[in-house]
Image: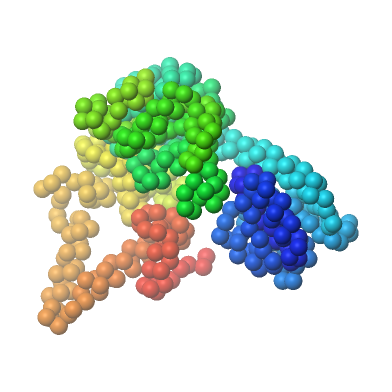
């Protein structure tokens, strides 16, 4: 089972008490519900590896709960229990997707055996699902790691030589150059294909949480540790662990990481027993680790452990030959994901893209193409679709840029108003800018609010509130 947490729903106090005691002794975290409604609430708050449900409850039946779980929580296995030993119940439970079915009164040994069987089935199902996703990613990666330039050919050559081996690899390069894509390519071309690829950004996790993310923790290790949790090293067992932004790892954790690389074992927080781990490390950084070693903010011994095979990823400005290929790929991606109809760039727009410095590298190029595709009024992108890329002092007439248009409109509008009598001008202007912007992005994304929120760079709940507050109509088609 994916989770060690079990939901028990039964309206009989004695059954809940017995199951809670028996399953807690086995090391499971147990949540109890005396009705179907309580069980439904708990299902909305937690993820469960297993649910043990009584069929007959006063409000929502176990069979209806089973249907809900099968639809909304497909990774949760369900064991149905009931006092009614009718064939109808058994057939109905299995039809609705129950893992198994036992009758009251039941022997705890029988329940233990059923749960053990569910655990093994969950592990197999999870492994099959993970393999499908990994193979899907593998074939997608063949399309997304793009580049025919000489610098990228050198990267491919090195990747092909080192991927089948077990050596530790250090990827270096500026932000946005595609280090995680290369790390995945190393994994998918290694002997560890079929095992997990786990990525962890060391800079994105607070110091106090990073250790538990890496090594996991035992129940009771600290306040809030209500159940055991495995860390990324255990989750990546047999596969590859990608440690991004390794230069931001605190010194005390660097010591522990070095020990793992040397001893091939970890100890969970709050635990005493070493746990063997078989993990290949691919690390990445956009910092100069040698400089950090000299500054004593990065351990020299860890640096040499990680830097067995260094691969430096070229910035986009060093491989302009790849820009047209990347533009075509990102335009195709925009057509598929955003419903745009942009087919390409006119020569002047392509020259602008080729001459720009791209400090944000491939990631910045993708964002620029995505934004231009959404806001362009024609099938071909023009230089005016990239106002932020125009050379300073050569951006063309003011009215050609979005900022220029807005400035002219504001000047015209404010020219007829008495500024001294207005005290909420900022909010008034923002509303008039937000409403058409959100409406246009919603139209461009075919009213897919999840995608629209991503394009706008805001939370989906924030977008929903803005739609309501700004009274933006949503198409029903």
Name which residue lies at 59% across and 35% down: 131
**Residue 290 image point, x, y percent:** 25, 26
Residue 96 in view: no
Q: Is residue 384 visible?
A: yes
**Relative height, residue 267 to residue 190 (above, below):** below
Q: Picture quarter containing residue 118?
A: top right
- Horizontal arrangement in the rendering, residue 135 relative to residue 375 (left or right): right
Picture coordinates of residue 219, whole percent (x, y):
54, 47
Q: Residue at x 63, y 58 (%)?
A: 31
Against 1, is 79 above or below?
below
Q: Which residue occupies the foreground of this view, 415 or 32?
A: 32
Q: Is residue 104 left or right of residue 178?
A: right
- Residue 199 position, x and y percent, is 44, 37
Q: Position of residue 190 (x, y in %)?
A: 50, 23
Q: Which residue is found at the position 67% from the left and 63% from the top?
A: 33
Total of numbered circles in the picture? Answer: 0
Report whether 461 appears left or right of 203: right
Q: How is the image coloured?
A: rainbow
């Amino acid at each position: 089972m994916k989770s060690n947490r079990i939901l028990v729903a039964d309206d009989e106090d004695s059954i809940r008490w017995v199951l809670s005691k028996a399953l807690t002794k086995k090391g499971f975290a147990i949540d109890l519900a005396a009705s179907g409604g309580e069980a439904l609430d708990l299902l909305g708050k937690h993820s469960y590896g297993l649910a043990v449900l009584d069929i007959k409850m006063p409000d929502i039946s176990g069979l209806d709960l089973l249907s809900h779980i099968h639809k909304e929580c497909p990774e949760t296995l369900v064991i149905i229990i009931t006092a009614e030993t009718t064939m109808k119940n058994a057939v109905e439970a299995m039809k609705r997707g129950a893992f198994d079915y036992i009758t009251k009164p039941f022997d705890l040994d029988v329940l233990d055996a059923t749960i053990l069987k569910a655990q093994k089935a969950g592990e197999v199902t999870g492994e099959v699902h993970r393999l499908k996703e990994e193979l899907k990613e593998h074939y997608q990666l063949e399309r997304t790691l793009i580049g025919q330039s000489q610098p990228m050919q050198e990267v491919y050559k090195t990747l092909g030589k080192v991927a089948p081996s077990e050596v530790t690899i250090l990827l270096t390069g500026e932000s946005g150059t595609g280090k995680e894509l290369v790390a995945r390519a190393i994994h998918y071309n290694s002997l560890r294909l079929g095992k997990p690829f786990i990525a962890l950004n060391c800079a994105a996790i607070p110091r106090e949480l990073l250790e538990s993310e890496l090594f996991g923790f035992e129940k009771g290790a600290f306040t809030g540790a209500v159940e055991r949790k495995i860390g990324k090293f255990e989750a990546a067992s047999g596969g590859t662990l990608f440690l991004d932004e390794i230069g931001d790892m605190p010194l005390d954790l660097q010591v522990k990481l070095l020990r793992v690389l040397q001893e091939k074992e970890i100890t969970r927080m709050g635990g005493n027993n070493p746990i063997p781990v078989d993990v290949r490390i691919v690390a990445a950084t956009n910092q100069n680790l040698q400089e950090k070693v000299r500054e004593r903010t990065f351990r020299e011994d860890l640096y040499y452990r990680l830097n067995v095979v260094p691969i430096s990823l070229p910035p986009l400005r060093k491989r302009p030959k790849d820009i047209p290929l990347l533009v075509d790929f990102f335009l195709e991606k925009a057509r598929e994901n955003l419903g745009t109809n942009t087919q390409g760039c006119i020569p002047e727009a392509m020259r602008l893209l080729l001459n720009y410095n791209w400090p944000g590298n491939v990631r910045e190029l993708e964002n620029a193409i995505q934004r231009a595709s959404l806001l362009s009024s024609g099938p071909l992108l023009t230089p005016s679709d990239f106002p932020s890329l125009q050379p300073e002092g050569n951006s063309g007439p003011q009215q050609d840029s979005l900022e220029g248009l807005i400035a002219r409109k504001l000047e015209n509008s404010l020219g007829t108003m008495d500024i001294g009598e207005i005290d909420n001008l900022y909010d008034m202007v923002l509303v008039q800018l937000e409403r058409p912007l959100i409406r246009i992005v919603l139209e461009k994304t075919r009213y897919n609010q999840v995608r629209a929120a991503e394009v706008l760079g805001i939370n989906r709940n924030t977008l929903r509130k803005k739609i309501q507050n700004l009274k933006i109509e949503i198409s029903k088609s």
